[in-house]
Image (cartoon, rainbow, N blue to C red):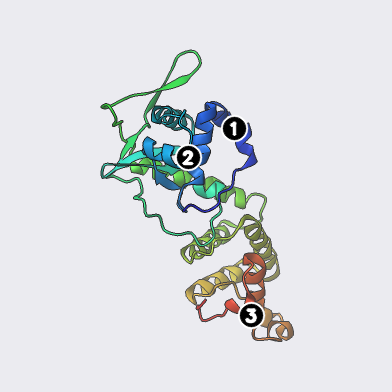
Amino acid sequence: MARKRMIDPSIWQSEDFSKLSTLAKLVFIGLFSNADDEGRGRAKAIYIKSILFPYDEVIRVTDIEKSLDEIAANMSITFYLHDGSEYYSLENWSKWQKIDKAQASQIPAFDEDSTMIRGTFAEQSSNSRRTIVEQSSNVREPVPPKRIEENRREEKGKEEADDFADRSFSQALQTKIQEWFGYKHERKEDYRPTGKKALLTMLENKAKQYGEAAVIATIDQSMASGWKGLFWDKLEKAKGNTQTAHSDASYNIGEMEDFFLHNTPVYEGVKDGTD
């Protein structure tokens, strides 16, 4: 069963969303409401009708088919065939939905063995409505997985550029911070927007206090040691601040930072890498 999903208020001002019919808007909201933690779901029209409108006899499967075509033409979503089954994958999923402890999808990702459906469109008519270019009765020209991956990387690059806007980091430190974000993602401990902003502000202050080389070295040591947070003990010792850095072995600087940035109990931030 799908988890609760967010509906961003900006969707109602979206020009692309406004192009959808009323039914297609409901279907689109239904698709991301029922998507799994990786933004994927089953896309066969008769199945979507059964889960979204089980009691609406007026709505037909053909109406759902038409709505899916509208959604494919206007929204950031990929419909595809894999081993004879129809699926969908919502692009920019992580931008709009923040998932804690995400579960791996049971639905196959779009890859070289998949065929895109509802997905190749040409602009036509004075009102710029899109039409499907069919390869056969149901199968459309596939979009290379490489292109989709490039689009996702480009979107991710834009998000990272926004993160570092108006920051005083050198390119070397910015690269190292991005490595830290990747390290935390591998541990399934991604920062939320507020936590990420707080971390960047803290690192900016630490770089001014100790120098960027010391901050880079600290990040490297934390990743190499498998630590959950960033620990500044050695730098604090060098500054002669040992009275606060070791006043309580259970609540050192790194653990308190991890508590405030991740909202996790400080006793989980032990240095041996175990959670």
Residue 110, image x and y in percent? 35, 45
- Residue carrying label 3: 233
Residue 127, image x and y in percent? 51, 16
Relative horizontal placement of residue 117, taking residue 25 as reference (left or right): left
For the residues bearing labels 1 and 3, Cβ distance under 8 angstroms: no
Say if residue 175 shows up in the picture.
Answer: yes
- Amino acid carrying label 3: it is Asp
- Amino acid carrying label 1: it is Ser
**What residue is rendered at 35% in x and 43% in y?**
146
Residue 258, image x and y in percent? 62, 70
Relative horizontal placement of residue 234, taking residue 156 as reference (left or right): right
User: As displayed, is residue 188 above or below residue 267?
Assistant: above
| Upstream in sequence: badge 3 or badge 2 | 2
| Upstream in sequence: badge 2 or badge 1 | 1
Say if residue 92 shows up in the picture.
Answer: no
- Residue carrying label 1: 14
For the residues bearing labels 3 and 2, Cβ distance under 8 angstroms: no
- Residue carrying label 2: 52
Q: Give the distance between the C-alpha atoms of the residues marked 3 and 2, in whole angstroms.
A: 55 Å
- Amino acid carrying label 2: it is Leu
